[in-house]
Amino acid sequence: MASSPSGGYSGGSSSLQNSGSGSEGDHQQHHNIMDQRKRKRMLSNRESARRSRMKKQQHLDGLIAQADQLNKENSQIRTSVEMTTQLYLNIEAENAIIRAQVDELSNRLQSLNEIIQYINSPPCNYLIDEANQETQFNDCGFMMDPWNFVPVNQPIMASADMLMY
């Protein structure tokens, strides 16, 4: 039993030492827990920052790809506009030629109609002053050559090769 009081004493003393060192141990343990939480939070923050950088890089890569695609489309549209403009200018040039041809053909048609009208009208009286030998107009409106009695300003005669472009 002698051992029991010493064991009791020893236990009491041990208990006192544990309680004294226990508060220091609790503080140390609390400090260790805080350090673990701090390390865990730092790791979590690092991982979050890494994910954020990756997400930002992916977004930037997407924007760069989109800009490249838009530049390619813009280039294709420019090429298309240039081709369309060239076609438009070619068609405008062709239209100008066709308009000139229409004017020329209209003038020829008018001349031919005047010839037909002249042929179908009653004979004209030529007014020529032979004494002065001057060119004068007949009553049909044509200028006459007094030497040949042939109209000088005859209408243009149409032929098949005139209609070729």
Image (spheres, rainbow, N blue to C red):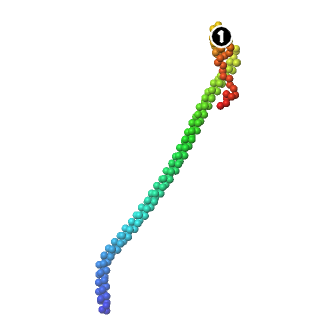
Where does the image place residue 54, in percent across and percent down from the top left?
45, 60
What amino acid type is highlighted by mark number 1? Ile
Tell me if 112 is positioned left or right of 52 in this view. right
What secondary structure is found at the residue carrying circle 1? Answer: loop
The local crowd at label 1, few if under 14, some if 14 to 19, many if 20 or more residues have their Cα within 10 Å, is some
34 up-or-down from 128: above or below: below
Where residue 114 sits, quadrant-wise, is top right
Where residue 49 sits, quadrant-wise, is bottom left
Where does the image place residue 140, in percent across and percent down from the top left?
65, 15
Q: Nearer the viewer, residue 13 or 36?
A: 36
User: At 66% from the left edge and 19% from the top edge, which residue is drawn?
Assistant: 154
User: At 44% from the left edge and 59% from the top edge, which residue is drawn?
Assistant: 53
On the image, numbered disc 1 is attached to which residue? Answer: 128
- Specify whether residue 139 is in view: no
Query: Image quadrant for the C terminus?
Result: top right
Tell me if 14 is positioned left or right of 161 in this view. left
Q: Nearer the viewer, residue 165 or 58?
A: 165
User: At 43% from the left edge and 62% from the top edge, which residue is drawn?
Assistant: 50
66 up-or-down from 132: above or below: below
User: At 64% from the left edge and 10% from the top edge, which residue is drawn?
Assistant: 133
